[in-house]
């Protein structure tokens, strides 16, 4: 999977969405041979009451997934996203904006019968979003490294996605530090946080304590004084020994 797509998938999952990535759309042209028309980077589906439950916590502490405001997700309706991910400009490929392709996506979601799908596709192409007869939202969202000109659909910078996921790991570290994440992006960020915490703890252990430093300085001074006294005694002994030898030589003469 493309790294940028994996990042966006993690972002949407943390916002309560179920996801399908790199969904291939196969078509049968007039030539009579099947071919892949395009791959849709990400499809996402979210129920409005999506929540994270941690067994053992009290009911009042069960956290509802509060979606990132940048997503513009409805608070009371099912939300379906057709997403395009680009490291460069956030925009949909022309193939992904074909009526037949978007119709195949709606069939994959299973949200509506073919006659209604035709109406929804027209709304998606014109406004970047549509609403089914059941009140469910279907939206086009492009993620990218930068923005180009005007587009009828929502666009979200990849830099914002990175900040959101990184902040999420730090804010929920008490929980996530115990998780063995299979999501590659989330697992990598958890590993970085673990290494950062371990490095910080190690640095705190290695940082010299002011009291210990003072004791060490005192010991060094005492050791220096002791060496100075030893050298003074040693010098005096040598001087006395030299005088004795001189007196003995004078007596022999």
Image (cartoon, rainbow, N blue to C red):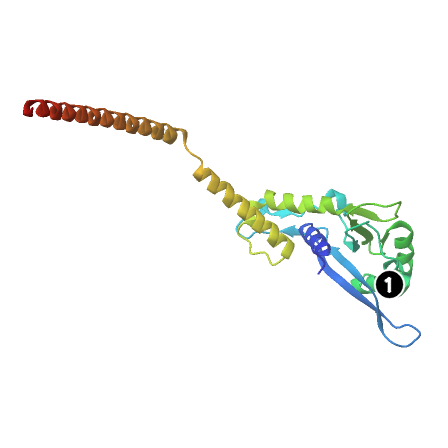
Q: Position of residue 98 (x, y in %)?
A: 90, 60
Quarter of the figure with the N terminus: bottom right
Q: Name the residue under label 1.
A: 101
Task: In the rendered view, tell whether residue 222 sits above or below residue 187.
Answer: above
**Snapshot quadrant of residue 39:** bottom right
Write the residue at 54% across / 44% down: 196
Q: Which residue lies furthest to the left in this view?
A: 252
Left or right of 164, for residue 202: left
Left or right of 164, for residue 79: right
Write the residue at 73% across / 56% down: 5
Task: In the rendered view, tell whether residue 1 sits above or below residue 91.
Answer: below
Q: Position of residue 92 (x, y in %)?
A: 84, 54
Q: Can residue 163 be seen in this view?
A: yes
Q: Which of 24 and 120 is in front in this view?
A: 24
Q: Can residue 58 be seen in this view?
A: no
Q: Nearer the viewer, residue 192 or 53?
A: 192
Q: Residue furthest front?
A: 253
Left or right of 3, for residue 242: left
**Snapshot quadrant of residue 159:** top right
Q: Which of 242 and 184 is in front in this view?
A: 242
């Amino acid at each position: 999977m493309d790294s940028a797509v994996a990042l966006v998938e993690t972002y949407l999952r943390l916002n309560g969405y179920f996801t399908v990535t790199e969904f291939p759309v196969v078509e049968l042209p007039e030539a009579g041979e099947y071919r892949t028309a395009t791959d849709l980077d990400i499809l996402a589906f979210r129920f409005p009451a999506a929540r994270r439950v941690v067994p053992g916590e009290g009911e009042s502490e069960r956290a509802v997934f509060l979606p990132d405001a940048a997503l513009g997700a409805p608070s009371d309706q099912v939300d379906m996203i057709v997403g395009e991910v680009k490291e460069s400009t956030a925009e949909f490929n022309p193939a992904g904006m074909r009526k037949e392709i978007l119709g195949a996506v709606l069939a994959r979601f299973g949200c509506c019968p073919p006659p209604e799908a035709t109406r929804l596709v027209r709304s998606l192409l014109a406004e970047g979003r549509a609403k089914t007869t059941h009140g469910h939202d279907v939206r086009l969202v492009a993620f990218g490294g930068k923005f180009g000109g005007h587009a009828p659909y929502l666009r979200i910078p990849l830099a914002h996605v990175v900040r959101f996921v990184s902040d999420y790991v730090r804010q929920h570290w008490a929980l996530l530090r115990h998780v063995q994440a299979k999501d590659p992006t989330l697992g990598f960020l958890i590993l970085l946080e673990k290494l950062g915490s371990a490095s910080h703890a190690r640095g705190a252990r290695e940082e010299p304590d002011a009291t210990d430093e003072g004791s060490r300085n005192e010991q060094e001074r005492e050791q220096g004084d002791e060496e100075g006294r030893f050298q003074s005694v040693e010098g005096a002994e040598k001087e006395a020994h030299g005088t004795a030898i001189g007196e003995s030589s004078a007596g022999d003469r």
